Amino acid sequence: MKIGFIGIGNMGGAILRGILSSGTVSPEDILICGRDPLKTEAQAGELGVTAAEHRKLVEECGCFFVGVEPGVYADVMPLIAEAYTPDKICISMAAGITFRKLQDWLGDDAKVIRIMPNTPARVGEIMTSVSPNENVTEEEAAMVCHLFDGMGKAETVPEDLISAVIGASGSSPAYTYMYIRGLAQSAQDAGMTEEKARVFAAQAVLGAAKIVLESDQTFDELIDAVCTPGGATYEAVTYLRENGMEELVARGAGAAIDKANQMSKE
Ligand SMILES: NC(=O)c1ccc[n+]([C@@H]2O[C@H](COP(=O)([O-])OP(=O)(O)OC[C@H]3O[C@@H](n4cnc5c(N)ncnc54)[C@H](OP(=O)(O)O)[C@@H]3O)[C@@H](O)[C@H]2O)c1
């Protein structure tokens, strides 16, 4: 089956490159469509895939990703609908573009999967949710999850949890970069070069994230395992606790969740 990509920006482009480098789909079976045909031809040439305009792509592909900005859906979905038939799977990655809106464009019998990926797809460490609508079979949902093999992790969630995914993983690379910058700044302030401080901070976050994924200990147990009472870590943890660091992060991610919920209602 051929796979299409409509919108090959940061997110769609990262998933496309991830699929190509994992070898799950061969380049001959991939069609892409961007906003500007000349730019799309150049991207297709660079990636070894085929450029097509919207209708042609949908006609030829059994499954296609829509990776345009939420505000562009109103322009792109009517073009898709012209060539769409309900045996094709439409995979949408936009915040706020609900099943209801997608089925209003494609029909109530349309097979629609919403995904909420994140940009670490670029480095083979995506976290994406997969939410199939009622017209998608279990085999079809499994096939879409399989596209993410070798690119990180994919988990199925119901549509009403997509906003939670946005707060915890879709948007969170941005605030994780802020945290890493804060760590690196502390090392720079203590005399380390910017380059080295970046590596120390980022590798520490990567390692800690791996421990969280591989361990069955609670967060408090993991924190306690690094703290010696009276030691340096204890000082930092006490300061951050007294200043409400975790509550602040949860409220920040909560703002992304609220915004996503609001976008779904518009
Ligand atoms: N970035 C993230 O971390 C993230 C995470 C989860 C979900 N998402 C979702 O992913 C979607 C894309 O986000 P993004 O960050 O990848 O945005 P982006 O980098 O701006 O990419 C959007 C792409 O869509 C293309 N496009 C615009 N109009 C088009 C049209 N009429 N036909 C075909 N392609 C068109 C743009 O082409 P030009 O560049 O030529 O304008 C651009 O390549 C959004 O809906 C967003 O909510 C993003």
Image (cartoon, grey):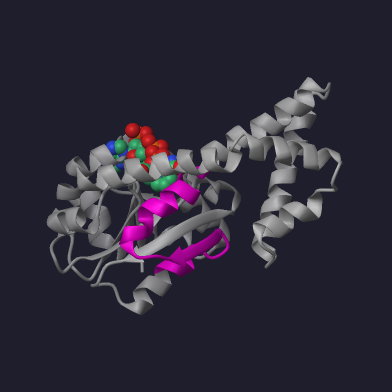
Which is more toward the observer, 7 or 27?
Answer: 7
Vertical comparison of 94 with 151: above or below = above
For the N terminus, the image quarter is bottom left
Magenta stretch encompasses residue 118: no
Left or right position of 18 against 44: right
x, y percent for residue 132: 32, 67
Specify the quarter for ligand 1.
top left
Number of numbered discs present? 0
The residue sitting at 77% across, 21% down in the picture is 189
x, y percent for residue 3: 37, 61
The residue sitting at 54% across, 37% down in the picture is 175
Boundaries of the magenta span = 144-172
Residue 105 seen from this side: yes
Which is more toward the observer, 181 or 47?
Answer: 181
Quadrant of res 30: bottom left
Quadrant of res 131: bottom left
Magenta stretch encompasses residue 150: yes
x, y percent for residue 143: 41, 72
Left or right position of 200 against 25: right
The residue sitting at 75% across, 37% down in the picture is 236
For the C terminus, the image quarter is top left
Residue 25 seen from this side: no
x, y percent for residue 219: 66, 57
Vertical comparison of 197 with 255: above or below = above
The residue sitting at 25% across, 38% down in the picture is 71
